[in-house]
Every structure is written in structure tokens, then in C-alpha cells.
Image (cartoon, rainbow, N blue to C red):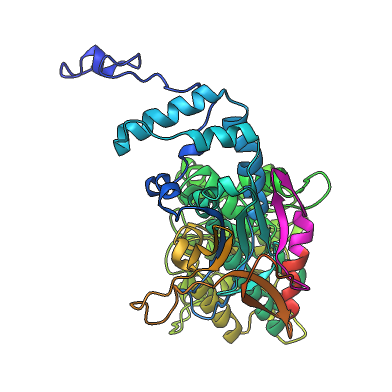
Amino acid sequence: MTTIPPSLGASENSLGSSDKFDLRPRRPRTVSFPPTLLTDFYKISHRDQYPLATTVVYSTWTARESTIEDIDHVVVFGVQAFIKRYFIDYFKENFFDRPREQIVAEYVRLIRNTLGIAQPPTDHLEALWTLGYLPLEVRALREGTLAPLRVPSVTFVNTKPEFFWLTNFVETLFSAECWLPSTSATLAFEYRKLFERFAKETGGDSDAVAFQGHDFSFRGMSSVQAAAASGAGHLLSFTGTDTIPAILYLEENYGADTDLELVGASIPATEHSVMSAYGNEGIDEFKTYERLITELYPSGLVSIVSDTWDLWRVVGDYLPRLREKILAREGRVVIRPDSGDPVDIVAGREQSDNTLADRGVVEALWDVFGGTVTSQGYRLLDPHVGVIYGDKISLASATRILERLKAKGFASTNVVFGIGSHTYQRTNRDTFGHAFKSTSVTIDGTEKAIFKDPVTDLAHLKRSPRGRVAVTAVDGRLETFEGLSSDDRIQADQLRVVFRDGEVFGVETLSQIRTRLLSHLQD
């Protein structure tokens, strides 16, 4: 029996209510953070700082630069989900449908206690509440579009003069929610391009490429919502995922339906706790593999993590002994190592003494199970076995694996990549320089182009467009027309209205967005 040390008294060790501070919520539990406070502190005072008689503020959302070599486009994604989740559902539930007195009281309390303003003005919030919708117009490129760097993908403008302050008030919320799905979708598409290229070069199964990138990132993301949004971006280019909320995100926001289409999928798979529970004695571990492939999963796909102890004993001893049983199955046994240098483990070492570790898992499986040779002359493993690797995978390491496999005469589709938080969490808003900047204002009836171009920014990466913008296709490439006014009408402007005055326009489905994005693989 465990004894509680005397130093831990009942009041400190109890799961009951605390006697030190009040844990009760200050708002009803059904109410999320007030949207009037989902912004940076400095936004609170900007309404008073604009020139007097300001009636219109127009802003753009643009990916300005890339910190990743050879990526000069970003995938437009996440705008429709944001509009539905926040401009429609969130504001309705947490602002327009709540009593005005509650909204005012919670805003005044926090601003008074944090900015030290004795009587925070609330007339602008009360006017918005009375209006009953967000008086904004949002235009955006179609999702799944590859937007070149420095070409705006979204624009915002207020539709009623008294709400000029609202345009940039929503910057913080939009930026926080939208840079990630676009960034992850962009990286996933780079993986898809990489896998497609090597599949063509080595004669790999082209149908397998859609499953060659598998999202392993959920547990490494900053939150469930981040995992869902990022994972949805992954699913524009692939159909393999272990991030279940990403599928729900796409069903909720992009008309996806798992009853009717393949949104995302996975297979039964073990983890180290399962494997180690049997013990690491050779006879016990061998029986674990035997039970998995003959009793629990006598057919179909199953992935077995194989380096809980000795990966090379698994591929060099257990699998040869189970060869006939594996070949007799209808389905594939996927071997999953997930530690060590991914290039060496999967594709073998460049300097080889011909040990199993030198040859790598793909070649070791070929030695046991054989396979076929593609029309380009590359070896493709017997379909009863495969390899997935999901630790520290990056675009660079995936490229090296495929290059080394090709050099050794193996087709690229012999391996599936678990793409995890090493790719999707090691990013930020500056990975592609996403920025929300005002480019036009109207003051006392006169429209004025505005911009920023810091003299200290020697590369002019932070220079913003001037005036209102349009985006058109010139020789197949999207380009920006700037310096426009509200009176200008540009034919074939790719920026289309997706939200205006509380209504959503141009809703598109996952299927449409996937088709648009993947069509760029032919470029």
C-alpha cells in the first residue's frame, strides 16, 4: 500500500475544490473565448489611431518568401474552413446570439484590468452586435491553387464605413488559423511531386503514390485543432493518414463524406507497447509475429513495428522462417522500423560489408521474398511485404532514401513514408512569410493606395502591394495587378468573393480542391 508523505496534506493532495483561488469559470462553460478578444492587444486601440474620417480599410494576405529551397509557390488552403468555423459559426454562437450586456461586460472587465483604460469604449462592438453579421467582403484564390510567392491569395475589405476598424481587427485570428493548413498543404504537395518523379523514373506503381505519404504528425502537433488543420492539408495530396481529426475537419468544412469517397485511410498497426508486452526473448518475439500474421490478421494489410529490440534479427531470422505463411496470406505485411538514420535503415549504407544493416530493410526483404522487375529495370518487392518508415522524415531525407534505392536498383514505391511532426510541426508563419497587410484606405471620401517598404529590408521581402489588387493568369502563371481602386474591374480576376456580409459564396468540396491541386502534377 502506498503511504502519502506527511508533507502532502489532504488539502494539497485532494482532487476537490481548491481553497486558494476560485476555479469556477467567469463565463458560462458553453461560451468559448469571446471573439471581441481574439486579437492582439495593440489592435484594441487602432480604431482611434486611424486618420479621422477613415471609412474603408482594404488588406491582403500573401506568402512573401520561402525558407525552403526550390519552393516558390504555396497551396491556397484553409480559407473556406476559417470562414465557416469563425466568420459564420463562431461569431454567431459566441457574439451575435449572446446577450449584448454579457458581451460588453466581459470586454470592459478585461480591457480595464489589462490596458488600464477606466472606461473602454464599446459603442463599436455594440453597433456590430446590433448589425448581426460581419460587414466584410473576402475574396480568395480557389483552394488548391498554387499561388506564386508575393501574389496575394486573399483580400479583406469592410462593406460599411463605420466598421473600417474591423478589417485589420480580424488579422490576428485569420493569420493564427490559416498559415498552418496552407503551409502543411504546400509541404505535402512537395512530397507528392517527389514521389511521383521517382515513381516515373523507376517504374514504381503509380497508384501507390497516393498512399506513399502517410500522416504520422498528430501527437507532435501543438493542439488537436492544429493537427486537424495540418492533417487536412496533407490529405489534399495523399490518402494515407493516422490523424483522424483531419478527416472530420474535411467532412465538416469541405463537403467530404467517408460514406461516398476515400477521404483518408489507415491500416491496423502495432506499437512498441504491444511488441514489448510479449517479452524480448527470441521465441516469444517470433510467436508475436506469427500470431499477428496468422491469427489476428490472416489477411489484409498489417503494419508491425519491428525495432523494439533487434530489427536485423526480425528481418534476418523471423521473416525467413515465416516466409511461406506470409506469401500464403492475401494481403501485405508491412515492416516498420522507426529508429536510427532513416536513409541507412531503409536503403542501406553507402559503404557496405554486406551485412543486413549494410543492405538495409528493402534489400533484406528482397533477399527473402523476391519480387518483380519494372519496365525500367528496377526491383519491386513481392506485394505480400512492404516497408514504412516514420521517424525524422523530411523532404531531404526522403529524397536521399529514394536516390539511394534507385542507385541500388530498387523502385521508389517499395517504401511508404510516415510524415510526422518532424515535417509538419517544424514550421511557422515565416516558413513562407505569410502576412496580412493593408494596401488601400479611404479617408473623407478619397481612396488612397498605401504600402510598406522598410529601408532596412534590403531584399524588399516585406514590401507590400500598393492599392487594391487583382490576380490574373499570364502565360499560365498567376501575376498581381496592383495600384487599383474600388472602381477598377479586371477581367478574369482570380480573386473571387467567398464571403460578404455574413454569407458564404463559392463553396467547394475536397474532391474539387484535390483535383485542382493534383492537376499541377502534369505541369
Residue 403 visible (yes or no): yes
Front-lying residue, 50 or 438:
50
Q: Quadrant of residue 386?
A: bottom right
Residue 264 visible (yes or no): no
Q: Position of residue 443 (x, y in %)?
A: 53, 59
Quarter of the image containing the C terminus?
Answer: bottom right
Q: Is residue 225 rendered to the left or right of residue 392?
A: right
Front-lying residue, 224 or 148:
148
Range drawn in magenta: 490-514
Decide whether residue 503 is among the magenta residues.
yes
Front-lying residue, 81 or 485:
485
Residue at 52% in and 56% down: 306
Residue at 50% in and 63% down: 437
Query: Relative to 113, is 476 above or below?
Result: below
Q: Residue furthest front?
A: 444
Q: Is residue 287 rendered to the left or right of residue 21?
A: right
Quarter of the image containing the N terminus?
Answer: top left
Q: Position of residue 375 (x, y in %)?
A: 77, 85
Decide whether residue 209 is among the magenta residues.
no
